[in-house]
Image: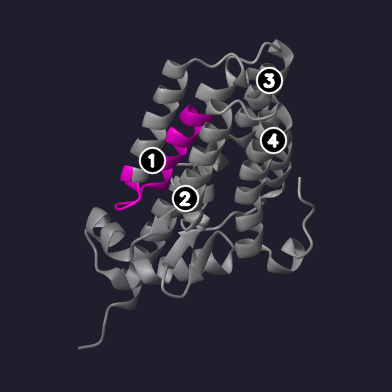
Amino acid sequence: MTPDTSTTLSKSQLAYRWVKERIANQEFTPGYRLVLGSIAGELDMSVVPVREAIRQLEAEGLVTFERNVGARVSMVDDSQYRFSMQALSILEGAATALAARRLTADDIRAARRINELMIETLEHFDPRAFTGLNQEFHAALFTKCANPRMLELVDAEWGRLGHLRDSTFSFVPGRAAESVREHENILQLIETGAPLGEIEKAARRHRSATLDAYMIHEHPDEALGLPAF
């Protein structure tokens, strides 16, 4: 029996519009995995028209297909992300160092507990949940910074990242395990009263390492010789 081409085409276009709208309204953020079976179930159709829709979105540059990963939403323009992450590495490093001597044992315990929750998420990894905890962890370390202007600048850069902040660990999930180990190192430096320069460097390198991992994954040619911010 010959398939009804017009019906297949209309379903393909329905799937195309459905996915594209969710990319446009940021429900599907960069790095979000597009599971064909789930989309087909949501739209009550087979995976065939969904696959055609994904191919069309891939041709437009909105979706990237990666071997052993599948289809995911592309990072269409990541310059904002790159600039903000560079700025945050410097600003958060300084703010963390300036706050270090003000942190109490209770503050450090609370931060460590957040890091433990992050470790617990690694087995069934959810990039968005991990990113939320990650931001909470760092805020626990730098919010006691006595320089309000520094804190305003950090908040401004987080605001500029917008929905992109939820995407980093979608692109480089392997970075998450390294990140929580580095968190513990920063906590130990603060606990032991390490020189503020060492704390600043550890916090700065920690943030820039996430950018490095993203760059190596997405822009391997540009990643070579990245400066050690």
Query: Quadrant location of residue 222?
Result: bottom right
Query: In front of the other: label 3 or label 2?
Result: 3
Q: Is residue 88 at all visible to an observer of this figure?
A: no
- Please report the bounds of the magenta region as a residue range: 120-138
Label 3 Cα crowd, 10 Å radius (few <14 / some 14-19 / many 20+): many
Residue at numbered disc 3? 98
* Mark 2, other Cα within 10 Å: few <14 / some 14–19 / many ≥20: many
Q: Secondary structure at mark 2?
A: helix
- Place residue 27 in its image quadrant: top left
Give amino acid for label 2: Ala
Residue 66 appears at what percent x and percent y?
49, 71
- The mark nearer the N terminus, 3 or 4, is 3
Answer yes or no: do the residues labelled 4 and 2 have beta carbons within 8 Å? Answer: no
Task: State the separation of the CA atoms marked 4 and 1.
Answer: 24 Å
Q: Which mark is residue 176?
A: 2
User: Which quarter of the picture shows residue 8?
Assistant: bottom left
Which type of secondary structure does the marked residue at label 4 adopt? helix
Report the amino acid beneath label 1: Met
Q: Mark 4 or 2 closer to N-term?
A: 2
Check residue 129 for magenta coloring.
yes
- Residue 131: horizontal and vertical position, in percent? 46, 39
The residue nearer to you, when weighing 30 against 114, is 114
Is label 3 in contact with label 2 (beta carbons under 8 Å)? Answer: no
Q: Are marks 3 and 1 in contact (CB under 8 Å)?
A: no
Separation of residues labelled 3 and 1 (CA atoms): 25 Å
Mark 2 and mark 1 in contact (Cβ < 8 Å)? yes
Query: What residue is disc 1 on?
Result: 118
Q: CA distance from mark 3 to mark 2?
A: 26 Å
Dot 3: element: helix
Residue tagged by mark 4? 198
| Residue 15, numbered circle | none
Q: What's under tag 3, amino acid-wise?
A: Leu
